[in-house]
Amino acid sequence: MFSNSKKIVVSICKFQELYFAVAIQNSKIIGSSLGRKEEEAALNDISTREKLRISPYYIKEAENLGKAYFGKKVYFKLNPLSGKNFKSRVLEKVCSIPRGEVRSYKEIAHSLRSKGYRAVGNALNQNPLPIIIPCHRVIKSDGSLGDYKGGVDMKKEILTNEGVNIVHNNILRK
């Protein structure tokens, strides 16, 4: 998953009772965790076969994960995106969804001139940067939440923190 060109630095912090971690390599975010109740679980979200070096150097990025999880508008200054394949285009499109709004898998596919909304779901399933690339903002066409790496309850919590109205696991769209 990660290249060997330079060591991976990980910063982790506790924010409002949850742990958040980021993995940085060559000044780019290459991995992020979801909000986890245990530090080890946050580190497992970004685990790799390579040895990680824990450092407070990127603590601001880890704190920003926590802030974003709890609905604050944040900016991640380390650009994580590169590439022009379908997966990269999906992730880039998802980054353009404003905080507090959602799009369906089908809407994302159509915006990319594709009919492959399931392929959009597959690309998001491989998102190495949850929260930073806000795949939690992508829902099913019928307004239901759909799947999420951290579980439907976590997806619902993050969206609610962003001000999205949810009733019985369905989005109330404006």
Image (cartoon, rainbow, N blue to C red):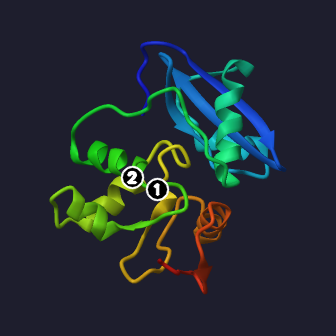
Q: Residue type at mark 1?
A: Cys
Residue 55 is situated, as x and y percent measured from the top left of the image, at: 71, 19
Q: Nearer the viewer, residue 21 or 156?
A: 156
Residue at 16 percent across and 61 percent down: it is: 114
Residue 78 is situated, as x and y percent measured from the top left of the image, at: 50, 26
Q: How many marks?
A: 2
The CA span between labels 2 and 1 is 6 Å
Residue at 53 percent across and 55 percent down: it is: 99
Residue positioned most to the top: 6
Q: Which residue is mark 2?
A: 94
Proximity of marks 2 and 1: CB atoms separated by less than 8 Å = yes
Q: Secondary structure at mark 2?
A: helix
Q: Nearer the viewer, residue 125 or 48?
A: 125
From the image, state whether disc 2 or disc 1 is nearer to you.
Answer: 2
Q: Quadrant of residue 111?
A: bottom left
Q: Which residue is mark 1?
A: 135
- Measured along the vertical axis of the image, is residue 26 above or below residue 103? above
Residue positioned most to the right: 17
Circle 1 crowding by C-alpha within 10 Å: few under 14, some 14–19, many from 20: many
Q: Secondary structure at mark 1?
A: helix
Q: Nearer the viewer, residue 92 or 98?
A: 98
Q: Is residue 8 left or right of residue 14?
A: left
Q: Is residue 33 left or right of residue 25?
A: right
Residue 152 is situated, as x and y percent measured from the top left of the image, at: 58, 70
Q: Quadrant of residue 39?
A: top right
Residue 29 is situated, as x and y percent measured from the top left of the image, at: 51, 29
Closer to the chain start, of discs 2 and 1, is 2
Q: Residue type at mark 2?
A: Val
**Which quarter of the figure is the N terminus placed in?**
top left
